[in-house]
Amino acid sequence: DAGITQSPRYKITETGRQVTLMCHQTWSHSYMFWYRQDLGHGLRLIYYSAAADITDKGEVPDGYVVSRSKTENFPLTLESATRSQTSVYFCASSARTAGSNQPQHFGDGTRLSIL
Amino acid sequence: QKEVEQDPGPLSVPEGAIVSLNCTYSNSAFQYFMWYRQYSRKGPELLMYTYSSGNKEDGRFTAQVDKSSKYISLFIRDSQPSDSATYLCAMKTQNFVFGPGTRLSVLP
C-alpha cells in the first residue's frame, strides 16, 4: 500500500544502547521529517531532509543522527539512548510544489521506552 | 510565549453538538494553516489545509482563519463519537509549527 510506514511500532531498550528507527515512504516525496511527541510539548522537530543526502537540524537534534541515502528512506538513530529520549517518534513526508512545502503526512509512530 | 497556543482540554460534548476548537499564534509570518486529527496510538491525519483568511468548508468541518487577530478555529457540526480524538493545529512559513493539541470526547 502507498503511504508512510514506521518500524518498529514499539521498542524497549536500555540506556547507552544504540537504537535505529526506520521510516519508509512510497509517495516519492522530497521532504521527510522526524518528530517526537511528548505530553505538554506537542510535536517537536528533530531533523528533516529536503532530498537524498540533504539533512538539517530541527528544534531538538541533540543525541540523534539521521541519514538519507535514498529518497524513500529516512532512518533515525539514537547513538547512546538516554531516558529523556523515551517518547513517541513520528516520521512525516511532504511534497514540494510551486516552491512551497505541501502539508505533511505522518506515519503511525514508534513508541520508544528507554529503561 | 509559545509560537502556537492551544487549549489542551479535555473537551467533552454530547453527540450532535457543534464543536469549536481554537488556536492562537504570535508569528504574523505564518501563511499556511492546517488542522490534523490524531486518534490514540496513531499518527496525525490531515483534515483541513488553508492559506487565506476566511472560511473553508469540507463536509461537517469548517476551518476559519483570522490573520488580523492571529486566530484560527475548527468547527465540527453534528459531532459523532468517531470524532473523539486529539486535534492539532499547525501553521508554517518555512517550517511547520504545531500546537500541543486539544483532546475531544464526543459522548453518545
Image (cartoon, grey):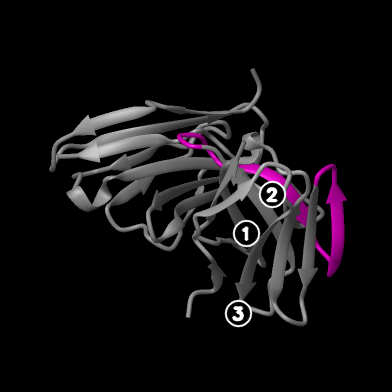
Question: In the figure, residue A92 lies in which quadrant?
Answer: top right
Up/down of B53 relative to A43, above or below: below
**What residue is drawn where x is 37% and y is 34%?**
A21
* Residue numbers of the magenta segment: B40-60
The spot of residue B34 in percent (x, y) is 69, 55
Q: Is residue B89 left or right of residue B3?
A: right
Task: Give SS at disc 3.
Answer: loop
- Tell me the CA gap for discs 1 and 2: 9 Å
Question: In the image shown, does A70 or B33 lie closer to the viewer?
Answer: B33
- The type of residue carrying mark 1 is Ala
The spot of residue A50 in percent (x, y) is 59, 49
Task: Give SS at disc 1.
Answer: strand
Q: Nearer the viewer, mark 3 or mark 2?
A: 3
Task: Give SS at disc 2.
Answer: loop
The spot of residue B36 in percent (x, y) is 63, 48
**What residue is drawn where x is 67% and y is 67%?**
B93
Up/down of B106 relative to A38, above or below: above
Name the chain letter of the residue that bears numbered label 2.
A
- The type of residue carrying mark 2 is Pro
The outermost residue toward the top is A1
Reading the image, the residue beneath label 1 is B90
- The type of residue carrying mark 3 is Ser
Reading the image, the residue beneath label 2 is A103
Q: Earlier in the sequence, mark 1 or mark 3?
A: 3
Residue B26 numbered tag: 3
Same chain for mark 3 and mark 2? The answer is no
- Residue B44 on the magenta segment: yes
Q: Nearer the viewer, mark 1 or mark 2?
A: 1
- Quarter of the image for the C terminus of chain B: give it: top right
Name the chain letter of the residue that bears numbered label 3.
B
**What residue is drawn where x is 26% and y is 35%?**
A19
- Residue A8 seen in the current view: yes
